[in-house]
Image (cartoon, grey):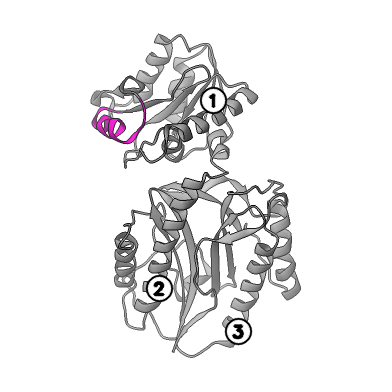
């Protein structure tokens, strides 16, 4: 059990309070991150139906998992055995039969079929089939979108969660150091990522790493003008820039970081653009403090870009914490103009300054924690364009 029972109870109490505010009696949380947050469950089983279930008046959540994964629920969660609900293997890939058919039976047996039920309509892996099974099987229930209720409950981290993210950040630093060492002309991209991944898993002597919820991203050359490209078998070429975006992971907590490396002679345009990018990033960071909003941070960031005539339409940050594939973002706060989310101590986010110009780009990012008086960076690694001549 990663956290104390007291911390899990605090989480549950927070979620129940939010349920009450939204008039939700029963919450079905399919998001793997939220399952972890509510129960401690941690396994690579999210590709098929599973969920955490919270009743407004029941002492602890229920964990609904496949029979093959029940052992993981007994091992990883803090729940009593009777709170682990197991569906049989004969529900696996037997359409139109589906695990949520059994979930519907359970809800009916507990006389919860006339309640207001909140579901995560836009959660990864909560399929249209899941929703249709609930809607058809529970015609007397009021099924509504919970509107990322648990995601928002996760926004402010506990001190223990912060400590996990600091450990993840140390691994991120080591991974980026390896990236800067192994990216060279003539080296295959896949070989470089192999070394980076090795570092991210080896971690430190004190603690090892885990798989990240996003693959190491490695747009190179013209690819730096695009986002979310991964390594190929192509070799790095002198004169090209490469953006490296990665995250160390500890106990499923992430601390992402992005940096840009240039192979060959210094390119003044890219150096100047990187410096302007860092100036914008630092300007945004300078106004991070409790009471300010995500909009305040975004406004300061874009003031610098406007000064230099740089256009950027995408957001420049999002909240982070627990992460399972395919994403390490929490789907709540965005560092973007108009997001009036108020910053509080221990709110954490990944602030990304990526600039793209048709056939080239540069990027730097920081994972950031809001403190009592301002902010702190999780990682300590130079943001400047790393030139390897």
Q: Position of residue 323 (x, y in %)?
A: 44, 48
User: Please, what secondary structure does the residue beneath circle 1 have?
Assistant: strand
Determine which quarter of the picture holds residue 206: bottom left
Of label 2 and label 3, which has the lower sequence position? Answer: 2
- Give 112 or 39, whichever is nearer the viewer: 39
44 and 20: which one is in front?
20
Placement of the C terminus among the 4 image quadrants: bottom left
Q: Please give the residue where the numbered disc 2 appears in the rendered image.
A: 177
The local crowd at label 3, few if under 14, some if 14 to 19, many if 20 or more residues have their Cα within 10 Å, is: few
Mark 2 secondary-structure assignment: helix
Q: Is residue 97 visible?
A: no
Q: Look at the image and give the residue range highlighted in magenta.
A: 66-79
In the image, is residue 91 part of the stretch drawn in magenta? Answer: no
Badge number at residue 316: none
x and y, in percent, of residue 14 in the image: 56, 31
Between the C-alphas of marks 3 and 1, the distance is: 51 Å
Q: Is residue 72 magenta?
A: yes
- At horizontal 54% and vertical 28% (from top left) the residue drawn is 13
Which quarter of the figure is the N terminus placed in?
A: top left
Dominant secondary structure, magenta: helix
Quick check: 382 above or below 118?
below
Left or right: where does residue 24 sit relative to residue 342? Answer: left
Task: Point out which mark residue 269 bears.
Answer: 3
Q: Residue at x 48, y 90 (%)?
A: 265
Label total for image: 3
Q: Nearer the viewer, mark 2 or mark 3?
A: 2
Viewer-closest of 194 and 250: 250
Q: Is residue 182 above or below residue 132?
A: below
Q: Which residue is mark 1?
A: 118
* Badge nearest the viewer, 3 or 1: 1
Query: Which residue is rendered at x = 53% and y = 45% of the image?
Result: 157
């Amino acid at each position: 059990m990663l956290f104390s029972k007291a911390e899990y109870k605090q989480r549950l109490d927070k979620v129940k309070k939010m349920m009450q505010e939204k008039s939700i009696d029963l919450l079905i949380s399919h998001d793997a991150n939220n399952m972890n947050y509510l129960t401690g469950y941690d396994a690579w089983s999210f590709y098929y139906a599973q969920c955490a279930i919270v009743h407004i008046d029941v002492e602890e959540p229920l964990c609904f998992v496949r029979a093959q994964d029940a052992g993981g629920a007994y091992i990883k969660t803090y729940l009593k055995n009777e709170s682990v609900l197991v569906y049989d293997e004969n529900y696996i890939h037997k359409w139109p039969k589906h695990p949520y058919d059994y979930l519907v039976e359970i809800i009916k047996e507990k006389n919860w079929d006339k309640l207001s039920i909140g579901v995560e309509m836009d959660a990864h892996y909560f399929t249209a089939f899941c929703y249709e099974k609930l809607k058809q099987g529970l015609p007397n229930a009021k099924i509504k979108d919970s509107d990322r209720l648990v995601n928002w409950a996760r926004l402010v981290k506990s001190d223990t969660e912060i400590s996990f993210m600091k450990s993840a950040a140390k691994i991120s630093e080591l991974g980026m150091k390896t990236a800067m060492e192994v990216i060279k002309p003539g080296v295959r991209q896949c070989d470089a990522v192999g070394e980076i991944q090795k570092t991210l898993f080896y971690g430190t002597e004190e603690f090892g790493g885990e798989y990240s919820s996003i693959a190491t991203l490695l747009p190179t050359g013209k690819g730096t003008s695009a986002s979310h490209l991964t390594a190929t078998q192509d070799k790095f070429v002198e004169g090209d820039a490469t953006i490296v975006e990665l995250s160390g992971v500890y106990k499923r907590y992430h601390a992402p970081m992005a940096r840009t490396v240039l192979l060959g002679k210094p390119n003044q345009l890219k150096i100047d653009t990187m410096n302007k990018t860092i100036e914008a990033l630092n300007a945004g960071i300078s106004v991070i403090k409790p009471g300010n909003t995500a909009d305040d941070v975004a406004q300061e960031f874009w003031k610098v870009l406007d000064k230099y005539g740089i256009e950027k339409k995408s957001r420049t940050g999002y909240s982070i914490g627990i992460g399972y594939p395919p994403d390490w973002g929490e789907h709540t706060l965005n560092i973007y103009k108009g997001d009036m989310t108020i910053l509080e101590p221990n709110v954490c986010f990944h602030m990304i300054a990526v600039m793209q110009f048709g056939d080239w780009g540069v990027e730097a990012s920081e994972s950031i924690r809001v403190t009592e008086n301002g902010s702190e960076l999780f990682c300590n690694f130079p943001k400047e364009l790393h030139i390897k001549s």
